[in-house]
Image: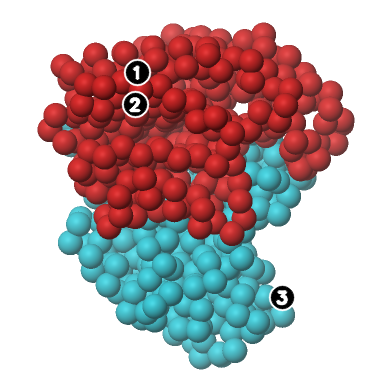
Chain colours: A cyan, B red
Amino acid sequence: MCQLIVHGGAGKIRSSQLYREGLEESLRRGYGALEKEGALEGVIAAVLSLEANPLFNCGTGSALNLDGEVEMDASVMTSEERFGAVGSLKRVEHPILIARRVMEETDHLLIVGDGAERLARYWGYPLYDPVVESRQNELEDVKRKGSAFLPNLRRFLVEEAKGTVGAVARDRSGFIAVATSTGGYAAKLPGRIGDSAILGAGTYASRWGGASATGHGEQIWRKLLCFEAVEGMRNDPAGRVIPRLVREAKEQGCSCGLIGIDWRGRLSQAFNTEAMLWGSIEDGQWTLNA
Amino acid sequence: MQLIIHGGAWNDHGGSLRAVAGIRYQEGIQRALDRGIALLERGNALEAVIASIEVLEDDPLFNCGTGSSLNLDGQAQMDAAVMTSEGSFAAVAALQNVQHPIAVAREVMTRTDHLLLAGEAATRFARSCGFPSYDPTTDSQRSLWREIVDHGQANLLPHLASFRDLQRCSDTVGAVARDRSGQLAIACSTGGLAGKLPGRVGDTPILGAGLFASRWGAAAATGHGEQIMRRLLAFRAVQVMRREPVWKAVAIPLSLSSQTFPGGLIGIDWRGQIGYFANTERMPVGIYDRGRIQIRSLD
């Protein structure tokens, strides 16, 4: 009795065979680890696979900031309310692994910037360049279009916001884990940290369930979307809480997608954007939407 | 019009420097209150809380701005945030070499569509807004840092637990105000934990953790940053303000917690009622309520 649900971002995304294959791979690896080693290993394996895939906006293939650099946010949380996160982390291959070590090996919850990169080196993670060419083209494009929007750059950036990956898993013993990882959005200001590194915003878990969000980071954070989702699971099944929150978010102008599993192992997902890449495995039963 | 300011929450543990400085804390809070009141009377809540916090940032006694705790490298890395009941929020984290982190947080609010800027890039942002380079380290914080480093031995990174007893409780400062129009605003600023890992961010710049405001009220937290973040303390306090009086709203989130940790909360609800609570020996607090001023140290 294991469940795993994975998302690969929400927004103006055209479905394609490549996305489908990427999600399949993530689910396969995640579920394998989930069955053998439990929920935490499951979500880490699922997110590692997406971080390695240049199609998704996390790890290799992350969106570039205004300087043309990759700065990544990632976090992990378990139903025992253990949490670790990194923000604005550069030059590592797998930010989710650093977030996990922040959780397991420090007294802190969130470590950012150069301090986070130094810690990654201290733990033996080598220098890595996650920049891919397609993202360089995207940045040029955004900058060009953005200048036409000046001085309405704010609104323009909001409309272009997309892409974060996340996974929620529940293992045989009822233990729940959540992992979320992102490159943020193209042309963000250097040093910007969004919801994916924030407890309660892009990631949350407690004994009542787990949730991971994607979409416009600032809006998701303001609403503490994942915290509200998991709190809601106390009394209602995930299948009621998640669609309701995503509907309410839309009414308030927050574009987002949300996935979650409640304490009884019920999965749910919802989005108010054009599309969301997601897939799940529930006791061996596959669902794929990409 | 109301304004409440706190200067951190901590236990003296006998020999603390702080035990003898109680009166100086009260004087610092008084100055911050005076400055805030002046702005509240002719301006809005946001201007008032920022002005109050700037006064505390300039006072080396408080763990924010000048006199911030130093990280393991011996650097001051500061976190600060502002929020209003209309939902505007902005913060900076792990910011170095500026005099007033709270003023940089305000620039993030007015100039960007982001909520949080962190690290070296935040310092760069501050420079581009015109804030000059400034060294906020003080002799007394340098000697505290030396004590921690000497005590911690070689292998303290990344295992901080071994010298946790030396880490002074992270005494964030915070201010909450309500202006004539009923708008609420909060500002918080801190140097974080002494001896923290470089890049560590606590609750202070985190919406929902160290501060939260909505139409129902506004709350600011202080105490052990990681525990406050885990429990989203300020968010929970404001949720309680919907139904309960403010004195309950600031006490409930701290008492509910199964694991106790040193902490305090201040808040103002939508009716303009003021509340404060701490489970520590000390939390200097200054209150301005409809023309009356009170300074308390809660000990």
* Amino acid tagged 3: Glu
The answer to whether marks 1 and 3 sit on the same chain is: no
Label 2 packing within 10 angstroms: few (<14), some (14-19), many (20+): many
How far apart in space, not on screen, are marks 1 and 3 (Cα)? 55 Å
Dot label at residue A11: none
- Mark 2 residue type: Ile
Q: Chain of mark 2?
A: B
The residue sitting at 49% across, 12% down in the picture is: B59
Crowding around mark 1 (Cα neighbors within 10 Å: few <14, some 14 to 19, many 20+) is: many
Element under disc 2: strand
Choose between A198 and B194: the one closer to the eye.
B194
Q: Is residue A277 above or below residue B161?
A: below
Name the chain letter of the residue that bears numbered label 1: B
Residue B228's x, y, as percent?
Answer: 52, 46
Q: Which residue is mark 2?
A: B287
Q: Position of residue A74 (x, y in %)?
A: 54, 52
Which residue in the rendered view is the most extreme toward the left? B181
Quadrant where the image shows the C terminus of chain B: top right
Q: Residue at x 39, y 81 (%)?
A: A237
Q: Earlier in the sequence, mark 2 or mark 1?
A: 1
Q: Please state if B55 lies on the left or on the right of A285 as rendered.
A: left
Left or right position of B121 against A151: right
Which residue, given by chain and number where applicable, does mark 1 sit on? B33
Front: mark 2 or 3: 2
Q: Quadrant of residue A146?
A: top left
Q: Which residue matches tag 3?
A: A37
Could you tell me which secondary element the residue under label 1 belongs to? helix
Q: Residue at x 26, y 64 (%)?
A: A273
- Do callouts 2 and 1 mark residues in contact (Cβ within 8 Å)? yes
Query: In this rendering, do the residues under marks 2 and 3 share a single chain?
Result: no
